[in-house]
C-alpha cells in the first residue's frame, strides 16, 4: 500500500473532481486524480502544523543596545527579547525570505520598556496601518507575522495597538496606561503614544503648558523638546464632548480649540426681579437697599451672607484618569 508524500506548502485552492475526469488512483503527480484532493489537504495540514502547531525553537536576545539579526536568527523561531533599556532598534535582515516563513517576537521586562522592530518590509494588520513601518514592542507584548508576497502579515499576538491615547478611569492602576496627572515622561519609554499624539493631538511647549492658569494643562507638552513629553493633567476635572461647530459650547466654539482645551467654571447669564417698596411708588433694582427714617431715604449696597461650597458641581464619583499607550 502506497503512502502520499506530504510537503509543507500552502495550497491556494483544492481541486474539484469533474464528471469528465477518469477516476484513477496512484501518485497525484502522475495522474492519480482520485488522490489529488487528499494530497492538497495533506500539504495544507503539514504547513499549518509546521508553522503554527509544532513547538518552535526559542532564542533569547538581551537588548541593551540596538542589534541586527540575520534571517536565520528569527526564521520559524520564537525570539524572546530581554529589554534592558528603551529606545533600542532591532533590525532584522529579511533578505532572501520566502513565502510561508513565520517570525515571532516576545518582549520581556516591564511594560515601560520598548524596542522598535525594523524588518525592511511593511507589516500588514496594524490598526489603520499606523504602525506598518514603525512597530514598537513594549515589555509583556508579543506578535507573530508570516511572509507572503513581499509583505509580513500579522497573524497573532498580544500587542496593544488599539485605542492609543484613549482616556480611561479606574479604581486600580491600568495596564499599558500612564496616569493623566501632568507627569513628564520619556519619549523612548512611550514611543507609540508620542507618535500618535504628534499626528492627531495638539502639543504645546512645556513653558506654555506650565503658564496660563491651567489653560494648556489639558494638552500634551513637548517636554524638554528632545527626549521627554508631558501628559495632560485631568485630575479633578469633568470631561466634555468637544463642540466641533455644533453651537452649544459658544464660549469655546472656535477652530483654535482642540481636544484637551481647558475651560473655567461659569454660571449661565441670567437675572432676578426684586420688588421693593419706594416711598414715592418707585422700585429698587437688585443689589441695593434703603437707609434712613421717615421720607428721607438713601441708596445703600448690601451683600447677602456667603453660602455653599468651593464649587458648583453635580453628584459625582471620583476615579483616577489614565491614558493608554
Image: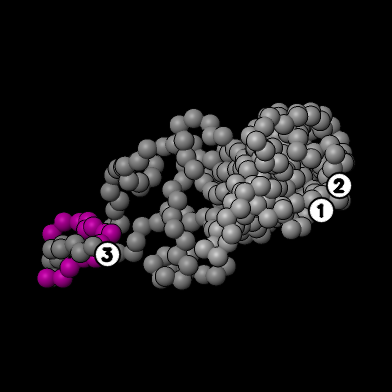
On screen, residue 163 versus residue 238, left or right, reads right
Closest to the observer, 218 or 68: 68
Closest to the observer, 315 or 200: 200
Q: Quadrant of the C terminus?
A: top right
Q: In terms of secondary structure, where does tag 2 sit? A: loop
| Magenta-colored stretch includes residue 88 | no
Distance between mark 2 and mark 3 Cα atoms: 73 Å
Q: Could you say which disc has been placed on residue 93 in the image?
A: 2
Q: What residue does disc 1 label?
A: 120
- Residue 225 at x, y = what percent? 77, 51
Q: Quadrant of residue 45?
A: top right
Closest to the observer, 171 or 292: 171
Confirm whether residue 73 shows in the render: yes
Confirm whether residue 51 shows in the render: no
Q: In terms of secondary structure, where does tag 3 sit? A: loop
Distance between mark 1 and mark 3 Cα atoms: 68 Å
Q: In terms of secondary structure, where does tag 1 sit? A: loop
Distance between mark 1 and mark 2 Cα atoms: 7 Å
Q: Could you say which disc has been placed on residue 4 in the image?
A: none
Q: Residues within 10 Å of mark 2 (few under 14, many from 20)?
A: some
| Residue drawn 87% across the image and 41% down it | 70
| Residue drawn 57% across the image and 67% down it | 256
Q: Earlier in the sequence, mark 1 or mark 2?
A: 2
Q: Residues within 10 Å of mark 1 (few under 14, many from 20)?
A: some
On screen, residue 39 versus residue 300, left or right, reads right
CB-based contact (under 8 Å), mark 1 and mark 2: yes
Q: Earlier in the sequence, mark 1 or mark 3?
A: 1
Q: Could you say which disc has been placed on residue 271 in the image?
A: 3
Magenta region: 281-294
Closest to the observer, 228 or 296: 228
Amino acid at each position: 500500500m502506497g503512502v502520499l508524500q506530504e510537503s509543507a506548502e500552502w495550497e491556494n485552492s483544492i481541486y474539484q473532481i469533474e464528471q469528465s475526469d477518469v477516476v484513477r488512483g496512484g501518485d497525484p503527480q502522475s495522474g492519480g486524480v482520485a488522490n489529488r484532493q487528499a494530497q492538497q489537504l495533506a500539504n495544507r495540514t503539514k504547513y499549518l502544523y509546521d508553522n503554527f502547531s509544532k513547538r518552535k525553537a526559542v532564542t533569547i536576545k538581551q537588548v541593551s543596545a540596538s542589534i541586527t539579526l540575520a534571517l536565520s536568527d528569527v526564521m520559524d523561531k520564537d525570539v524572546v527579547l530581554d529589554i534592558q533599556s528603551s529606545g533600542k532598534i532591532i533590525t532584522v535582515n529579511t533578505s532572501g525570505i520566502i513565502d510561508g516563513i513565520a517570525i515571532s517576537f516576545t518582549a520581556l521586562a516591564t511594560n515601560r520598556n520598548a524596542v522598535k522592530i525594523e524588518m525592511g518590509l511593511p507589516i500588514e494588520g496594524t490598526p489603520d496601518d499606523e504602525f506598518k513601518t514603525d512597530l514598537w514592542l513594549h515589555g509583556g507584548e508579543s506578535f507573530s507575522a508570516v511572509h507572503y508576497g513581499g509583505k509580513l502579515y500579522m497573524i497573532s499576538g498580544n500587542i496593544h495597538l488599539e485605542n492609543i491615547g484613549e482616556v480611561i478611569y479606574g479604581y486600580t492602576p491600568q495596564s499599558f496606561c500612564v496616569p493623566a496627572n501632568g507627569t513628564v515622561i520619556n519619549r523612548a519609554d512611550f514611543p507609540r503614544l508620542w507618535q500618535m499624539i504628534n499626528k492627531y493631538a495638539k502639543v504645546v511647549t512645556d513653558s506654555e503648558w506650565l503658564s496660563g492658569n491651567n489653560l494648556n494643562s489639558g494638552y500634551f507638552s513637548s517636554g524638554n523638546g528632545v527626549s521627554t513629553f508631558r501628559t495632560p493633567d485631568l485630575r479633578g476635572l469633568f470631561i466634555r464632548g468637544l463642540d466641533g461647530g455644533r453651537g452649544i459650547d459658544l464660549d469655546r466654539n472656535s477652530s483654535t480649540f482642540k481636544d484637551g482645551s481647558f475651560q473655567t467654571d461659569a454660571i449661565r447669564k441670567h437675572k432676578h426681579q426684586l420688588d421693593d417698596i419706594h416711598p414715592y411708588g418707585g422700585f429698587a433694582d437688585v443689589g441695593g437697599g434703603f437707609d434712613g427714617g421717615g421720607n428721607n431715604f438713601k441708596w445703600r449696597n448690601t451683600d447677602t451672607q456667603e453660602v455653599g461650597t468651593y464649587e458648583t458641581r453635580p453628584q459625582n464619583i471620583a476615579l483616577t484618569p489614565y491614558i493608554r499607550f
